[in-house]
Amino acid sequence: MNIAVITGASAGLGMKFFEHLKNNPEYDAFWLIARRKERLEALAEETSKPVKVLSLDLTKSESIDTLASELQKEKPVIRLLINSAGLGRIGRIDEQTRKESETMVDLNCRAIVSVSNVCLPYMTKGSGILNISSIAGFQPLPHFGIYAASKAFVESYSKTLHHELLLKHIHVTCVCPYWIKDTEFIAGAQHEHNKGYKHIILPSHSNTVVSLSMAALKVNAWVCTPGIITTAQRICAWIVPDCIVTPFMELISRI
C-alpha cells in the first residue's frame, strides 16, 4: 500500500497539503499525525480512502516510538512524507520561558529528524520528503530568534538529506514560505505580550505554497521559496552580511 504521511495535519500547511492530496490516485491511504485527534478524524471524513489517525505529540520520544511501531506492524510503502509540524513564538530570547524555547527546538528540529529516521526504511525509488522550513531560516531574526535558528537547522538538514538520497532516487525538498495568511500560524506566533512583527506585509496564501511545494518536489529542488518575497529574501541573505541584515530586521520588526 502506498501512503502519504503528514505531520502537523490538524491545521496549517499540514491540513492544506492533505486537502490538496486527498483525491490523488498516487496514494492509497493517508497517515495523519497531530495532537488534536478530533480534527484529524474530521479530516478523515473528507476522503473515501483509508486514513490512519495518529494523535501524537512529536516532542515526546514515546510518540516517535508509537509511529515506529505502527510502521513496523503495517510495513507500508511511504510515497510521501510531509514534515509540517512546527511551532513559532514571537518575542525576545531572554523574554521567552525555558519551556517555550525547548518546545520550539524539539518540535521544529528533533521531531523532523526523528520522524524522517523512522520513515526512511519504508521509502523507495520515487518517494519524496517535504520538510517545512521558513523564510526566517535565511538569517538571524530579532524577536523571532529561536524559531529562525530552528528553521536554519531544517534547511541545512534537508540539504544534506537531499544529497545523501540522490542515488536512491528519493526526492527531498525544503520549503521556505513567507507568512501565510490563511493558517493559524500567525495568530499562534503573536501574543498580546509579544512585541515585533505586528504588521505583516503581503502575506502569502496556503494554496500557492502547497502547489509550488509539490512542483518543486517533483523536480527535486532542494529548496523551494514559494513566492516573490521569500525568493527575494533568500537572494538578499546570500548577498548581504548578517551584521547588516540583523539590525535591519530589528527595525522592520518594530514598524
Image: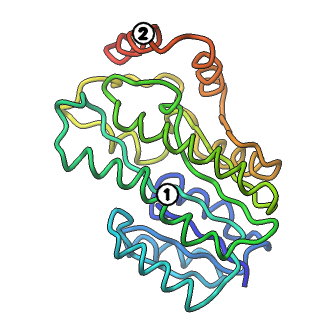
Q: In this figure, which residue is indicated by the disc labeled 2?
A: 248
- Are discs 1 and 2 less than 8 Å apart at CB? no
Q: Image point 60% across, 90% down: which residue? A: 74
Give the side of residue 224 with respect to residue 144, left or right. right
With respect to residue 251, does 211 lie above or below? Answer: below
Q: In this figure, which residue is indicated by the disc labeled 1?
A: 112
Q: In which quarter of the image is the N terminus?
A: bottom right
With respect to residue 71, does 135 lie above or below? Answer: above
Amino acid found under the numbered disc labelled 1: Ile
The quarter holding residue 236 reads top right
The answer to which of 143 and 46 lies nearer the viewer is 143
Residue 168 x/y as whole percent: 79, 63
Q: For numbered disc 1, what is the local secondary structure? A: helix
Q: Image point 47% across, 31% down: which residue? A: 136
Q: For numbered disc 2, what is the local secondary structure? A: helix
- Within 10 angstroms of label 1, few (less than 14), some, or many (20 or more) residues? many
Q: Which of marks 1 and 2 is nearer the N terminus?
A: 1
Q: In which quarter of the image is the C terminus?
A: top left
Residue 199 x/y as whole percent: 38, 22
Amino acid found under the numbered disc labelled 2: Phe
Q: Image point 60% across, 64% down: which residue? A: 18
